[in-house]
Image (cartoon, coloured by chain):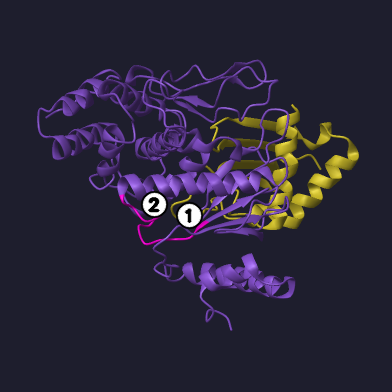
Chain colours: A yellow, B purple
Amino acid sequence: MCVKIYFERTGGFAGMRTSASLDTDNLPPNESEQLHDMCNNVDFFNLPSKLAPMIGAADLFRYKITIESKNGKHTVETTDTSMTPELENLVSFLSDKALKK
Amino acid sequence: MLGIVPPHLLREIINRGDPGLKKWAINTITLSEQVRMTRQTFVETVISVSEEKERRIYDAKNKSTLPGVLVRVEGGAPVNDPAADEAYDGAGWTYDLYKNVYERNSVDDKGLTLDSTVHFSEKYDNAFWNGAQMVYGDGDGKIFNRFTKAIDVIGHELTHGVTQYTAKLEYQDQSGALNEHISDVFGSIVKQYSLKQNATQADWLIGQGLFTSKIHGVALRSMKAPGTAYDDPLIGKDPQPATMRDYNNTTEDNGGVHINSGIPNRAFYLIAADIGGYSWEKSGMIWYKTLDLLDKNSDFEDMASCTLEAAGNLFGNNSAEQESVRKGWNGVGITIKK
């Protein structure tokens, strides 16, 4: 199944932006499988669209992840301190992709 | 046992006790902190109160669980880890500036313990304030070094705490850029205070030394010349504007809070340079007193008016200092309407 992912990281102390666009059809099979697993583990399509940090927090990275598949399209915005370990895994995978671009 | 042994005693035990006692005290102090943090999410007023400087440094061991393992407490010897020791020293300078110059006892003015976590996550290119403590990454080693390397970064993060307890500037658009600006101002002042530099001697850079030698750039931001801190094929060019003419209407980064802060940053530099002397004295005092005059939705024009008011309260209406404030804001394209 083809899945399109758009990832964007903004903010942080330095205020620098990085992003990545992925299409699972164009990824090596092992990575494509890994990505599917991560999306399933995190139950991405049922996550709230905004995961907010604690009041007063500043300089956190802002992550925006959009996933498009045959099940529809969903966007989640989150920060360094508002993620479950499962979502953190997905964000860390996507951050790596964005930085190696 | 929990919460019965006062923290200062636990600290003494950690510093002087035998290894067994030491371990017990570290566990206890860490556990009480965790309990306190849990409570804090329900009751915001639960705080550890002290009349003196209280620092704790934790090591996240490259995980993202906070606060991590306690490695150094107030009065403890250096631990031979540059990140932990820089976080400790930088928090100390910041506490001292606020206490000695502005008579403020820690970020909440009630002696809140200054907690810092180093080695957060892996190759983490950032430092942040999570609403209760400071957190520092090691950097990826290609673009960024460790974030404790610049003392102004430490002053910057702690000042987010000060703003949280004073002006409470909302972290979005212009009020967010002011929140960032105030952290840059006092971050830079902490650096100048630690080096005993006046406004002319200061470099006015934010994050000098954070870039590796592979990157073409001197720092992350320049308060003196916003937009000139870096220009590199890999990371692009410093996007900060220096005047209202170049204000960036973006939705990224909470409405460009790290970008448009260049405008008030430059205004502060112009004012500090015009007033002259040590910037923590007159210009810093004007900015510190302004924190009480702002509200959570204040914009750049409100900030300019409030600094003019604070300068009037401190040095008199039509004083030379107040004129410097008016001129400084004019210099970035903001006219004070009163």
Q: CA distance from mark 1 to mark 2?
A: 8 Å
Residue B306 location in percent, x, y? 21, 37
Q: Is residue B300 left or right of residue B158?
A: left
Disc 1 or 2, which lies upstream in sequence? 1
Residue at the outermost bottom position: B1
Q: Which residue is mark 2?
A: B164
Disc 1 and disc 2 on one polypeptide chain: yes
Residue B271 location in percent, x, y? 28, 24
Q: Is residue B111 magenta?
A: yes
In the rendered view of the protein, which quadrant contains the C terminus of chain B? top left
**Disc 2: which chain?**
B
Residue A23 location in percent, x, y? 76, 34
In the rendered view of the protein, which quadrant contains the N terminus of chain B? bottom right
Q: Is residue A22 left or right of residue B53?
A: right
Q: Is residue B281 magenta?
A: no
> Is residue B66 visible in this depiction of the protein?
no
* Foreground of the two, B78 or B282: B78
Secondary structure mostly seen in magenta is loop
The residue stretch that appears in magenta = B103-114
**Disc 1: which chain?**
B
Say which amino acid is labelled 2. Answer: Gln
Q: Which residue is mark 1?
A: B131
Could you tell me which secondary element the residue under label 1 belongs to?
loop
Say which amino acid is labelled 1. Answer: Gly
* Foreground of the two, B323 or A69: B323
Q: Kindly check if marks 1 and 2 are in contact, taking CB atoms under 8 A apart as contact.
A: yes
